[in-house]
Image (cartoon, rainbow, N blue to C red):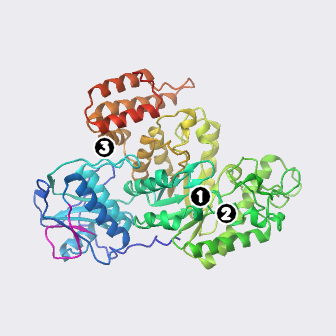
Amino acid sequence: MCHRLGFHALLTTLVLVIGTGTTSSAWGENAATAERPTQNKIDLIVDGQSTYAIVVAADAPLPVKFAAEELQKYLQQISGSRLPITSDASRSPAICVGEYGLPDNEKGALRAALKDRGEDGYAMQTAGTRIILAGNSPRATLYSVYHFLEKHLGCGWCIPGDDTVPKKTTVRLAAFDDAVGPPAYKMRKIVLFPYGSTSGRGHFMKSHNLPHTDWMAKNRFNWAHAGTNGPNNWEKNKSREVLVPEVEKRGLLLEVGGHALNTYLPVVRYGKTHPEYFAMKADGTRANTASRGNWICICLSHPDVSREMAKNICDWVDENPEVDSVDLWHDDQTVDDYCRCPKCTQVSEGSAKTEAQAKVAYANSYVRFTNRVAVLVAKRHPKVSVNALMYKQTLNCPADAPPLADNVLVGVALYPRWIQKRMRPLETSPQAIDANLRKQFPAWQKLSKHFYIYEYYTLTYRENFWSYASMIRDDMRYFRRCGVDGISSDQHVAGKWYDLNMYAYARLAWNPDLELEEIVADFCDHYYGEASKPMQAYWNLLEEGLRESWQSDAPIDWRDKQRTALIHKVLSSVKDPIAKRRILATAVKHKLKLGK
């Protein structure tokens, strides 16, 4: 379906697993056993000096070379020692990034450990003095480096742009043999939005979009989704020069568009000459003027619209061959914005057309339109998928909707879940919106070869839902039981990154069996350092309030007094200025009134 889905450049021939254990961690690795040279301790860096080199093939794929560079960078930040990067396979002692330079017996053991781990599976091993970091794809090899730095050297990737990098002049490691994967969800992503410089929103490429892309790779996401939402935003932000290199060197798949129908059928180009291409309004006129900016609905049933749309998409992909999926999402203005022409809203003969019936008929038209576009796109770009989002007007699945084409990636937006009085686990929530969503996403799933859930794990700032990792945990387990392939989350408001929610989302997208206590402890250990224990108590207070609210309709008790007292106490004792800054940032984000 996508350009990079077949990446197995490092490891293509896999043999039987020699043996696995059951030791688990926040990423669900298993300790593998194999016949290999071992030693109890590895002196990687001693008193700021190292005899090690980083070995990587000269012709290694870009993400593998980047993995070596990232390893070199963070080891130097930790210890002051800059390990050389070399393609000399005889170099010893060495950290091998990928299987290049390994003797046959170690290659065999590595491949055995990686068997059945999936494209994103990876391993971290020692063999004598050698350290081996490799994966089943270039992207997975990068994951192995980040996980090694996190697990064995204490680095943390908790919040975009605010890495934790400990300082130590000596790094002594015990022998290890870990294999990780496959992840529970094949697709794991967040939306880069607001995107770049957009009218009235400021410039977010440097402050948000690029740091979020970096964070995604460090937290084992595998898709980057540029939510450009309108004509020329991709080009205006010089995305091929600015964003694409950052995506490609991390081996991420790339989706572009968001609400993009007006991108590929812009009203400024077609409005005057082809008003019939655009939605018929309730009064019978066409919405073919540019006064509403990007939010222009189109006539899905007009035969020329799908052909013109597909042609323009294909022409754009010709100019942007790095793209793996193109969005075909409709207007994002209001739930009542859709084409009301007789063909787009056709109901059974003799039926009275209610508003609800018209919307279901429109959803059917959207499916058929998407299929027509997808078939045409596949003829010119067979490896590019078309992304359809079932959202607002198209959320409710028509009983007679046809299956989506094989090259359509179908998402169901759990909208507007986040405006409800409570954020409850979807599987058990009695709220009306949640109950309807439980019906709709399995119905769409049955019609889709490639399917994902589109969540809103950062939008509840409007209701001051400070933390709901408990709900995310329950939802991830529910979606997995339902056979969902992928998971995505909106990232709507710049500056409103929800720390524990997104950290939990990343971990649970890989391993839904993790317990919340593990995730909270892992986050706080890496982010707050010496203040980890009291900050675990802080976040657990929030989660207790959330879970308590599932049993009552009373206002949520977020334990404001207890949390305020706890923050005052920890700030009076913490020494590390970085930890103190992060604690204060958490309190400010949660609108605690600390006083002087």
* Residue shown at 26% from the left, 53% from the top: 22
Mark 3 or mark 1: which is in front? 1
Q: Position of residue 42 (x, y in %)?
A: 12, 58
Is tag 2's residue or tag 3's residue first in the polypeptide sequence? Answer: 2
Q: Secondary structure at mark 2?
A: helix
Q: Which mark is residue 281?
A: none
Residue position marked by numbered label 2 in the rendering:
263
Q: Is residue 187 left or right of residue 311?
A: left
Q: Is residue 131 left or right of residue 551?
A: left
Q: Does the CB distance between marks 2 and 3 fall below 8 Å?
A: no
User: What is the three-letter code of the residue carrying label 1?
Assistant: Thr
Q: Position of residue 48 (x, y in %)?
A: 14, 55
In space, the residues marked 3 and 1 are separated at their CA atoms by 33 Å
Is tag 1's residue or tag 2's residue first in the polypeptide sequence? Answer: 1
Q: Which mark is residue 228?
A: 1
Q: Where, by quadrant of the figure, is residue 279 drawn?
A: bottom right
